Image: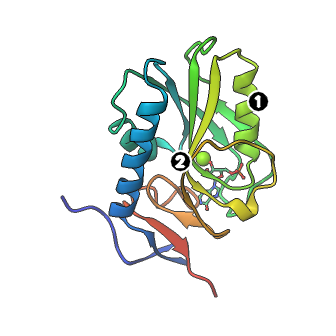
Amino acid sequence: MDLYQPEIVNINGEEFRVYLTHEEIQQRIKQLGKELSKDYKDKKPIFIGVLNGAYIFLADLMRYVTIPCEVDFLKLSSYGDEKVSSGEVQELKEIDADIEGRHVILVEDIIDTGLSMKFLADKMNRMNPASVSVVTLLHKKEATRYDLQIDYTGFNIPNLFVVGYGLDFAQEGRNLSQIYILQKG
Ligand code: IMP
Ligand code: MG
């Protein structure tokens, strides 16, 4: 299988280089899937993926989850086409599932300021679920300004813009199979 994985990629005039390889990502996701399968045994959790960015991560993660579970999606937008958060969360699509009494696992591609996840976790908690936990593939710890609990983190990364593996820059770059970081200077 020939995955799309150049060493360097240019998107909208900015240069990005490989930061996490396909193998590193898959290895970590496998561990997360194992951990979740153990922690949620007999709980039939519902995974809720945050569109668009988390679609590839959630698809891969699910394949390493070995217990009964469900999946749903919602869609948020806070970035528009910029590299910095707009500071506002817009909900573009709601979940279809009824989560009352359910064990909810929110799945994000990346937590940056934490605004989106704070908004979502608060919203989910108002729907009376049995529990809500947060899984994120990437966390920019230095950038996080909101107080929120992150239960499972794939990788802590520096406060630099990244693309690939579902994450975009102005909607491009989601099809890269690895994660790329903005070249400084
Ligand atoms: P937050 O609300 O500031 O935590 O931002 C979270 C959302 O912004 C994520 O779900 C991503 O969609 C997007 N985002 C944050 N940082 C990046 C990045 O480095 N690359 C691509 N998207 C990002
Ligand atoms: Mg996102």
Judging depth in this view, the residue of 72 and 107 nearest the camera is 107
Amino acid at pointer 2: Gly
Q: Residue at x 73, y 64 (%)?
A: 142
Q: Residue at x 59, y 12 (%)?
A: 98
Instruction: Work out which quarter of the rendered image holds the N terminus and state it.
Output: bottom left
Residue 49 placed where, x, y %? 53, 35
Residue 69 to residue 146: above or below: above
> In this image, 151 relative to 23: left or right?
right
Residue 33 to residue 11: above or below: above
Depth check, mark 2 against mark 1: the one in front is 1
Judging depth in this view, the residue of 38 and 81 nearest the camera is 38
Instruction: Work out which quarter of the rendered image holds the C terminus and state it.
Output: bottom right
SS class of the residue under badge 1? helix
Q: Distance between the residues labelled 2 and 1?
A: 20 Å
> In this image, 163 relative to 133: left or right?
left
Label 2 beta carbon within 8 A of ligand 2: yes
Q: In which quarter of the image is residue 152?
A: top right
SS class of the residue under badge 2? loop
Q: In which quarter of the image is residue 65?
A: top left
Read off the residue under disc 1.
122
Read off the residue under disc 2.
53
Residue 58 placed where, x, y %? 44, 40
Residue projecting furthest to the bottom: 185
Judging depth in this view, the residue of 144 and 178 nearest the camera is 144
Residue 5 to residue 131: above or below: below
Dividing the image into four quarters, tell me where ligand 1 lies.
bottom right
